[in-house]
Structure formats: structure tokens, C-alpha cells
Image (spheres, helix red, strand yellow):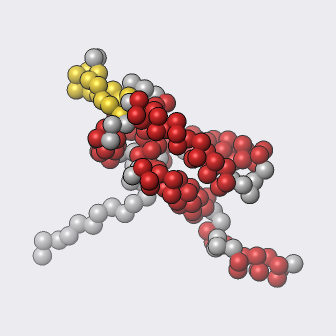
Amino acid sequence: MGQARSERTERSPVLGSHRVPAHLARRFNQICLGVTAEILAAQNLTPLTFGVLAAVLEEPGSGQRQLANRMGVDAVSFGQMIDFLEQKGLVKREIDPDDRRARRLYVTKRGFDLRRRLRPVLLAAQERLLAPLSKSERVALIDMLVRVIEANDSYARPGNGRRKPSRRSGT
């Protein structure tokens, strides 16, 4: 029995020491991004910019900073993605009547049509990704991921886990 385990481990692309949430989440994220990026490349969109478009569609009229926080994206990067989506005619910003310094975000008809057209293809790709799981396992996986993420949201800060820039001495 020990040999069967050893053979299975040797064939598995997942190292035994990486069978922990942090490593598995990184690999799962890598796979999910790859599957999604293949579909979005023809539109010159990344998975994250498409995610921003979907978030604006889901919460029309949201403030830019508030939506960036909800997505766990730093405000500067989020603003750059909104600039890009706005240039492509997919989203628009309007001045917030309650705070003239703030902007509310909306998806344009072009953005709505793009998402409506791509959504079935992206959902089918997600289904292929989860094909090794039964339907009930798929639902359970999503539910468990949401529970873990919501319970640990305080760790979901932009740039979290990156090395701090090193200070160079002037000598």
C-alpha cells in the first residue's frame, strides 16, 4: 500500500509538501486564470479586468473605491482598469451627486452585450475545469471556498504576501 501511495505522489503534479491551502489555492488560481485568459485574450481583456466589468454590472452606481475594496484590488490598479474599460467603451463614470470628488461606475450597452456574449463560454470553461467533481461536489467546493474567504477577509489586502521593498543604503 505504501508503494501505491508513492507511485501516485510521483505522478501527481502536486508535491506532498504543497498539499496545504496556500499552495493549492495558488495553483488553483493559476489554472482558473489560464482557462479564463484563453477566452478573454481575443477581447484584449484579462480575467481581472473582466471581473471588474462583471462587478460594475452586478453593482451599478457603486463608487470606484468601494468596489475596489470589495474586490480586494488596490485603488490605483482598479482605477487603471476602469480607465482601460472606459477607453474600450465598456464602462462609464459619472460624478457622484453626493460627493463631487467621487465617481459612480456603470456598464455601457457595449459592456453589457460583451458580458452577455462571453458569459456562457466562460461558464462552460468553469464547468470543464470542475469536471473531475460531481455536481454536488462542485456546489460544496464553491460554498466552502466562499465560507473560507468570508471568514478570512481581513487577510485579503492588495499586495498581501509580497516582499517589502528593500531599502538601499546611500553608501
Name the foreground residue: 105 vs 64.
Answer: 105
Q: How many marks?
A: 0
Residue 97, how many percent across, how many down? Answer: 27, 17
Residue 36 drawn above or below residue 23: above
Q: Is residue 163 left or right of residue 169?
A: right
* Residue 140 horizontal side relative to residue 20, left or right: right
Q: Residue furthest left?
A: 171
Which residue is more in the foreground, 47 or 147? 47
Q: 109 above or below 124?
A: above
Q: Is residue 10 visible?
A: yes
- Classify residue 94 by image quadrant: top left
Q: Is residue 66 above or below residue 126?
A: above
* Residue 5 in the figure: left or right of residue 117: right
At x 46%, y 39%, the residue is: 114
In the rendered image, residue 71, in percent from the top left (x then y), is placed at: 45, 41
Q: Residue at x 59, y 42 (%)?
A: 120
* Extreme-right residue of the structure: 1
For residue 33, say whether it is visible.
no
Q: Residue 139, how many percent across, how many down?
A: 72, 43
Q: Among all residues in the image, which is located at the extreme top?
A: 97
Q: Is residue 110 above or below residue 153?
A: above
Figure quadrant of the C terminus: bottom left
Query: Residue shown at 17%/71% (left/top)?
Result: 169
Q: Tell me where residue 90 sits by quadrant.
A: top left
Residue 115: percent from left, percent from top: 49, 38
Q: Relative to the observer, which residue lies in front, 91 or 55?
A: 91
Q: Residue at x 87, y 78 (%)?
A: 1
**Residue 5 quadrant:** bottom right
- Foreground residue among 155 and 125: 125
